[in-house]
Image: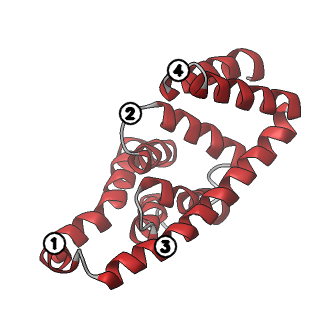
């Protein structure tokens, strides 16, 4: 199978079933690139995700662009981003009128409320895998220290999360790399 087709599939499928936006698609993309295609380890994926979160813009397109570039160069990056946005583009064009007609429907609202716990569980499983990898690779002290300091900076001192992420990236590059 062509690498470009694999890149397209790896991001198109999460784009279709990742109802709820970028955060909902993160575990789905992880499944494709780590488990199905084996392009990254869990640790590599978590590092890429940390870098992607540190940059502005939608997370799914940043992941698709980076992973697509790593696997297929500039064309792979383009195909990855195209694959992520294609399902939404198709749905917006085809179903915009229908969505506007039924947006206040109790059934649609109930469906949205039922999907949220599923997304929370998927994100929880992914976070557990990241913590497990961080614990094994960096140790409990480093992991807990970064988490506690980040929490204190954001909650007590109201430091913007972008600066906390940037600080964590610098710390990781200097002391954990």
- Which comes before the other along the chain, label 3 or label 1? 1
Q: CA distance from mark 3 to mark 1?
A: 21 Å
Q: Quick one: label 1, few (<14), some, or many (20+) residues within 10 Å?
A: few
Secondary structure of the residue carrying tag 2 is loop
Answer yes or no: do the residues labelled 3 and 1 have beta carbons within 8 Å?
A: no
Q: Which residue corresponds to mark 3?
A: 115
Answer yes or no: do the residues labelled 2 and 1 have beta carbons within 8 Å?
A: no
Q: How many marks?
A: 4
Q: CA distance from mark 2 to mark 3?
A: 26 Å
The percent coordinates of residue 3 (x first, y second) are: 48, 59
Q: Residue at x 61, y 22 (%)?
A: 153
Q: Residue at x 59, y 28 (%)?
A: 155
Answer yes or no: do the residues labelled 3 and 4 have beta carbons within 8 Å?
A: no
Question: Which is more foreground, mark 3 or mark 1?
Answer: 3
Secondary structure of the residue carrying tag 3 is helix
Q: Which residue corresponds to mark 1?
A: 96
Q: Which residue corresponds to mark 4?
A: 159
Q: Quick one: label 3, few (<14), some, or many (20+) residues within 10 Å?
A: few
Q: Residue at x 70, y 14 (%)?
A: 174
Q: CA distance from mark 3 to mark 4?
A: 32 Å
Query: Outermost residue toward the bottom?
Result: 107
Answer yes or no: do the residues labelled 4 and 2 have beta carbons within 8 Å?
A: no
Q: CA distance from mark 4 to mark 2?
A: 17 Å
- State whether residue 29 is above or below residue 141: below
173 or 41, nearer to the observer: 173
Q: Residue at x 48, y 24 (%)?
A: 160
């Amino acid at each position: 199978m062509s690498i470009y087709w694999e890149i397209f599939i790896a991001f198109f499928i999460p784009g279709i079933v990742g109802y709820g936006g970028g955060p909902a698609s993160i575990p789905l993309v992880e499944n494709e690139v780590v488990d199905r295609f084996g392009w990254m380890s869990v640790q590599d994926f978590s590092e890429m995700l940390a870098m992607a979160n540190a940059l502005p813009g939608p997370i799914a397109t940043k992941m698709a662009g980076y992973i697509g570039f790593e696997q297929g160069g500039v064309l792979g990056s383009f195909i990855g981003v195209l694959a992520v946005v294609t399902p939404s583009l198709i749905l917006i064009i085809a179903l915009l009128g229908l969505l506007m007609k039924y947006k206040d429907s109790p059934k649609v609202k109930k469906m949205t409320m039922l999907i949220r716990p599923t997304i929370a569980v998927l994100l929880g499983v992914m976070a557990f895998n990241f913590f497990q990898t961080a614990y094994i690779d960096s140790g409990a002290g480093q992991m807990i220290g970064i988490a506690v300091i980040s929490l204190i900076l954001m909650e007590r001192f109201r430091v913007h999360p972008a600066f906390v992420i940037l600080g964590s990236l610098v710390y990781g590059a200097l002391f954990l790399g």
